[in-house]
Image: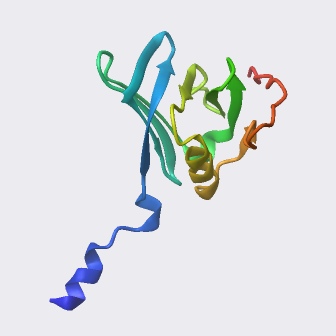
Amino acid sequence: MEDQSDNFAAPDSAHIRSFAVEAFVGRRATGWPFARFDISSSELRIRLSFPWFTTRSQQATAIRAVIATRRFGDMYWIGFDDGAGSLGDVHVHPICRRQQIIDELRRCGYHVIGDTVPRARAPRWHWRHS
């Protein structure tokens, strides 16, 4: 019986960490705590619940950069530059635990650029149009 318990361990690649955020997908928005930002080493996923019930995701291999910058005083904004463009109109506002979100993105291997140091200001990011 003890030998079988090792088979139930989930691999590290399946590890998903979820954060409550304000999220915007196109013209649809869901506020905290109903929107979720899921981070794993294999994909990023943004879920809007009430009233839209929409999900957008992208595989990690297609994401070129995650842009974290400060907007409107102390409000932070996280956007995505992905090859397929499926997250081009998606951005999230972390209400709390911003640094934990950035640390988790880096831990999972994503390239995070922008205003990631406290009290620093990032230059304006120019989106690539392909």
Between 97 and 129, the one nearer to me in the picture: 97
User: Is 15 on the left or on the right of 118, as rendered?
Assistant: left
User: Is 125 on the left or on the right of 72, as rendered?
Assistant: right
User: Is 59 on the left or on the right of 17, as rendered?
Assistant: right
Between 95 and 108, the one nearer to me in the picture: 95
Task: Kindly identify the residue that appears in the image at 55 percent across and 23 percent down.
Answer: 90
Q: Is residue 27 above or below residue 71?
A: above
Task: Kindly identify the residue that appears in the image at 68 percent across and 34 percent down.
Answer: 68
> Which residue of the protein is positioned furthest toward the top in this rendering?
27
- Residue 125, image x, y percentages: 79, 26
> Which residue of the protein is positioned furthest toward the left in this rendering?
1
Task: Kindly identify the residue that appears in the image at 35 percent across and 68 percent down.
Answer: 10
- Residue 87, image x, y percentages: 56, 27
- Residue 64, image x, y percentages: 70, 40
Between 2 and 22, the one nearer to me in the picture: 22
> Which residue of the protein is positioned furthest toward the bottom in this rendering?
2
Task: Kindly identify the residue that appears in the image at 63 percent across and 40 percent down.
Answer: 63
User: Where's the N terminus, which quadrant?
Assistant: bottom left
* Image quadrant where residue 4 sits: bottom left
User: Where's the C terminus, which quadrant?
Assistant: top right
- Residue 41, image x, y percentages: 53, 54
Between 59 and 24, the one nearer to me in the picture: 24
Q: Is residue 125 above or below residue 68?
A: above
* Image quadrant where residue 49 sits: top left
Q: Is residue 94 above or below residue 4?
A: above
